[in-house]
Image (spheres, helix red, strand yellow):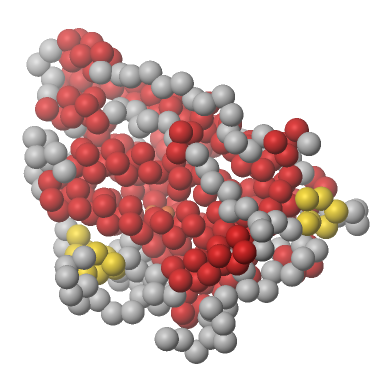
Amino acid sequence: MSATASPLHYSEEELLSSGSFREPLFANGVRCHGGFDDEGRYCSPRVLFRNPAINAWQDRLRQGGDTLFEISPDLIPPVHPNVAQAKLLLQNGVREPIVRALTIISIVEGFGAMIRDVKVPDLESLLVEPIHGTALAHLQRGLFEAHARDESGYRDEGGHKQMWEAARDAALENPKIPGDVLMRLMGRRDQRGRRKPLFPEIGEDLERSLGFMANVLVVEVMAAETFQWGIDLLSDPEISAAPEEAGGMVENIRADEKPHVEYLRTALSEVAARTIRTVDGKQISGKVVIDGLLHGILSEVIKNRRSDQRDDLREGLEKAVQVAAHPQRLLEDFDSLEFDWTPPSQTGFEASEAA
Ligand SMILES: [Fe+2]
Ligand SMILES: [Fe+2]
């Protein structure tokens, strides 16, 4: 099927190729990536070689006796507002907060394209063990680029950004988009500030690129809840004008996310299975570094994500409910639908941190 010498090595062109679809995917009049096969099943873009490649790298890792780590789904905080709350608002004519939430999702998907700008320093020289025939060796030779195209589209083809917009517009009948969505989102990101290096001994460039990948991986894993939320909400005929089209669109996006999670956790597991040369000529276990980065990011997310979402929503909710017949009662009903969530006490990555 391919001209490659071994299933562990792929050209950039292969990792970006989709093969052919019987029918392209259109969303709200926009030609999107991916398409449908003869049986009418949705097929993700750029996975013809990418999926077998990721499987081969994962098999190799396991066969070498190394671990492919997993981020526990228990760490994923529920989305706020939850589906029942979002539905309540829409049924009472309060659309702004939900339109805003869906628009934020589409913008964040588009931000995913930043992955193509990650400059991974020369891993051949920074890692003690070779990286020939690994996901790591293909990051900047197809994997990052495929990911970027999936998220924000490529040329005249829409990606996840456009697909979420289409789902929103189909379900809520081309709603008015609040003008300040991007500005408020950026304000929130600025407040975060820069994290201090956790491992100065590996050098700033390496920590920055590994940290970026770990961050994106966590965002991708956390997105599972957002997708389920989007599917449940937008495919509900009581509030969606296009339950099948909009719900189906989010399901297609979700299917495309699998290779993102898988290649990132493979590449980071490959680093964890190796030894990193420090800037002062010593060595540090890759596992200590990867576990430390993941533990730091996950601890912050499980602590802050839910309250961030709540603060963001609350900022505009009291004003937004004024369009309802009984704003105060609606707010009370909204709050009564809230449910508790206690973050797990462990991230699962603390062992090496303590070491
Ligand atoms: Fe995406
Ligand atoms: Fe993604």
Q: The N terminus appears in which quarter of the rendering?
A: bottom left
Residue at the right extreme of this rendering: 281
- Residue at 34% across, 40% down: 226
Residue 169 visible (yes or no): no
Q: The C terminus appears in which quarter of the rendering?
A: top right
Residue 237 visible (yes or no): yes
Number of labelled discs?
A: 0
- Residue at 35% across, 32% down: 79
Q: x, y percentage for residue 296?
A: 63, 36
Is the residue 134 above or below the residue 352 in the image? below
Residue closer to the observer: 143 or 308: 143
Is the residue 203 above or below the residue 341 in the image? below
Quadrant location of residue 39?
bottom left
Residue closer to the observer: 242 or 10: 10
- Residue at 74% across, 70% down: 130
Is 273 situated left or right of 6 in this image?
A: right
Q: x, y percentage for residue 216?
A: 52, 49
Quadrant location of residue 24?
bottom left
Q: x, y percentage for residue 161?
A: 33, 54
Is 100 situated left or right of 141 in this image?
A: left
- Residue at 45% across, 52% down: 111
Is 67 situated left or right of 52 in this image?
A: right
Is the residue 256 above or below the residue 130 in the image? above
Q: Quadrant of ligand 2?
A: bottom left
Residue closer to the observer: 184 or 64: 64
Q: x, y percentage for residue 230?
A: 26, 42
